[in-house]
Amino acid sequence: MDEVQVKNNVKVEVRAGGGAPALLPSPNRKQVAPMSDLLERLRARGWRMTSQRRVVAEVLDGEHVHLTADEVHARAVERLPEIARATVYNTLGELVSLGEVVELSTDGRAKRYDPNARHAHQHLVCVECGTIRDVHPDGDPLAVLPDSERYGFTVSKVDVTYRGLCPNCSA
Amino acid sequence: MDEVQVKNNVKVEVRAGGGAPALLPSPNRKQVAPMSDLLERLRARGWRMTSQRRVVAEVLDGEHVHLTADEVHARAVERLPEIARATVYNTLGELVSLGEVVELSTDGRAKRYDPNARHAHQHLVCVECGTIRDVHPDGDPLAVLPDSERYGFTVSKVDVTYRGLCPNCSA
DNA sequence: TTCTTGACTTGGACTTCGTCCATTGTAGGA
DNA sequence: TCCTACAATGGACGAAGTCCAAGTCAAGAA
Ligand SMILES: [Mn+2]
Ligand SMILES: [Mn+2]
Ligand SMILES: [Zn+2]
Ligand SMILES: [Zn+2]
């Protein structure tokens, strides 16, 4: 039988049976494994690997994209009950400066954190319910801005937010 | 013909002809006059014309674009010392719902209010100093989003923010 | 393994931006 | 001039985020 024990202040699933734990499908492998890439990258960048940072990274790596800092905190608390809000803010800020996470402010309310930073994309937002979808427009969005409209700026990125009604809210 | 001029919170009737004071260039005519269009439109929409609303409209009509609500309030206070912050927020909100002013949240901080709502345009923002410029990209920004990327949404507008360094901050 | 230390976390105070609401004031019509 | 529905006021409140002094601990050294 599997058992749960606490290690490094984090709940860890321990497989029954002797010998070294096989790195094979386990209940939470699907959730945790894809993150290992990120965790490795962070470690390589000199990050001190704490349980708090691990948990924040795991939350972001879920299928939940575009979470607010407080939503990340709420999910993190489920795994690590006493993680502080300030720590979540710190960690998110660090992930953003490292380019591992993208920060969105689509609605003038809470910023949202997007772990899909590898492939540039834009967002489609429902003005009614706030649903956000990733979209991939044709061509380079920067290309449509002629030099004559750049006023000497060095333009390095574009944020595009398409707004409208989602199928649900159209009804 | 009769003409109504507003000055110092008091309506003054200016009668054309016979010895009446001519409506000629005065120090603040240049500032106030262009707003009359907006004020007329608002009056036509059933707005009760208060000195507070007049002052907010006048502030927005200056050459100052993209002010925050508190910046609008600060400038309004210069003309009408006891105007309340809440009133500025109320008025800006109304102007936005009437489509007379556009609300921007380019930086996840305070929203900015843009009186240039007649001609659709986009914005170029310096990531260093926050300077904002209006830009007019080629073509319809909505056109670059293929139907296959709309997920059944009824897309009605696009907000585009180009980000980079202004000439000043490049040095 | 234990020790050491600077990086990290904590939690609460604080700031900023914005909303709410009971009370007071007034624009504009009768 | 008077009435009253609509608007302004200002202070409390709320949401989102930052800051900081004190405590904790990850990871390299020995
Ligand atoms: Mn995204
Ligand atoms: Mn503008
Ligand atoms: Zn919707
Ligand atoms: Zn600049």
Image: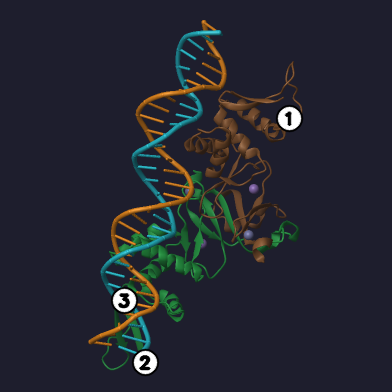
Chain colours: A brown, B green, C cyan, D orange
Quarter holding residue B75:
bottom left
**Residue A96: x %, y % from top left:** 57, 39
Q: How many C-alpha atoms fall within 10 Å of the one at disc 1: few (<14), some, or many (≥20)?
A: few
- SS under mark 1: loop
Q: Ligand 3 quadrant?
A: bottom right
In-front residue for pair A154/B93: B93
Residue hosting label 1 = A26
> Same subunit under labels 3 and 1?
no
Residue hosting label 2 = B1
- SS under mark 3: loop
Amino acid at circle 3:
Ser
In-front residue for pair B164/A71: A71
Q: Mark 3 lies on which chain?
A: B
> Same subunit under labels 3 and 2?
yes
Amino acid at circle 1:
Ser
**Residue B78: x %, y % from top left:** 30, 63
Q: Which chain carries label 1?
A: A
Tell me the CA gap for discs 3 and 2: 20 Å
Q: Which chain carries label 2?
A: B
- Residue A66 position (above or below residue A31): below
Q: How many C-alpha atoms fall within 10 Å of the one at disc 2: few (<14), some, or many (≥20)?
A: few
In-front residue for pair D14/B153: D14
**Left or right relative to B25: residue A70:** right
**Left or right relative to A33: residue B88:** left
- Residue B17 position (above or below residue B70): below
Q: Residue at x 41, y 67 (%)?
A: B91
**Left or right relative to B98: residue A40:** right
Q: Residue B26 carries which label?
A: 3
Tell me the CA gap for discs 1 and 2: 87 Å
**Residue B132: x %, y % from top left:** 49, 55
- SS under mark 2: loop
Q: Which residue is drawn at 72% across and 55% down?
A: A138
